[in-house]
Image (cartoon, rainbow, N blue to C red):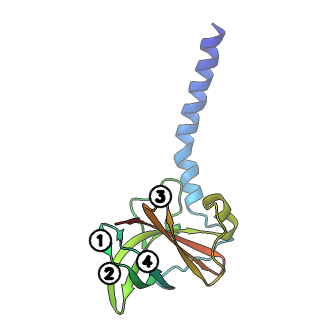
Amino acid sequence: MKQFGFVGMLVVAGLALAVSAPVLGSAFEQQLPESVDVPQGDADLGTVNLPRSVMANGETLSAGDYAVRLTAQSASPDTVGALSVLERWVEFKQGDEVRGREVVTIVPSAEISDVAKSAGPAAGASRVELLKENDYMRVWINQDGTHYLIHLVVG
């Protein structure tokens, strides 16, 4: 009988957490960490060289140099547990022409060690690296301690 009482308490606690999670989530989503300085509009993030062809939002980006531009457009649907200002679209441009778009994850310097295992590029620099048996490519841009991570499928 004690086992049923314990299981009942767990169920009640789980339901209470499930009911309060949306309330906690909406309060959290409205607070931007003080340690991150994210441009609210469009911003140039720099130029990167993609050594291989990749897929960006279903479109092929050929190997080559691209200017990366952060847009003001938040990614949607919203990512659970993420601030919409930290999940945005970037454009890969050659000259004045947009060749592709992809979602970028913006990570404050204080949180980057929770996200990436290796040390990031120096402030004002970028790095392009192959991941997961060369199936994915990460474009990692560091602007003033704010990290911009873009993950692309090789192919």
Q: Which residue is mark 3?
A: 133
Classify 10 Å Cα crowding around label 2: few (below 14), some (14-19), many (20 and above): some
Seen at 34% across and 68% down, the residue is: 55
What number is the disc on residue 105?
Answer: none
Q: Position of residue 102 (x, y in %)?
A: 40, 70
Neighbours of disc 4 within 10 Å: few (<14), some (14-19), many (20+): some
Tell me the amino acid under the disc marked 2: Arg
- Going by the numbered disc 1, the residue's amino acid type is Glu
Residue at 64%, 18% in the rendered image: 6
Q: Nearer the viewer, mark 2 or mark 3?
A: 3
| Residue to which mark 4 is pinned | 51
Q: Residues within 10 Å of mark 1 (few under 14, many from 20)?
A: few
Estimate the x, y position of residue 96 in percent, counting from the top left.
34, 92
- Report x, y in % for residue 97: 31, 88
Residue farthest toward the bottom in the current orientation of the protein: 95
Q: CA distance from mark 4 to mark 1?
A: 16 Å
Label 1 sits on residue? 59
Between 128 and 85, the one nearer to me in the picture: 128
Q: Amino acid at mark 3?
A: Glu
Q: How far, Cα to Cα, is label 1 from label 2? A: 8 Å
Inspect the image, locate mark 4, and give the three-letter code of the amino acid beneath it.
Answer: Pro
Q: Nearer the viewer, mark 4 or mark 1?
A: 4
Q: Label 2, on which residue?
A: 99
Task: Tell me if 40 is positioned left or right of 78 in this view.
Answer: right
Dot 3, crowdedness within 10 Å: few (<14), some or many (≥20)? few
The residue depicted at 67 percent of the width and 68 percent of the height is 119
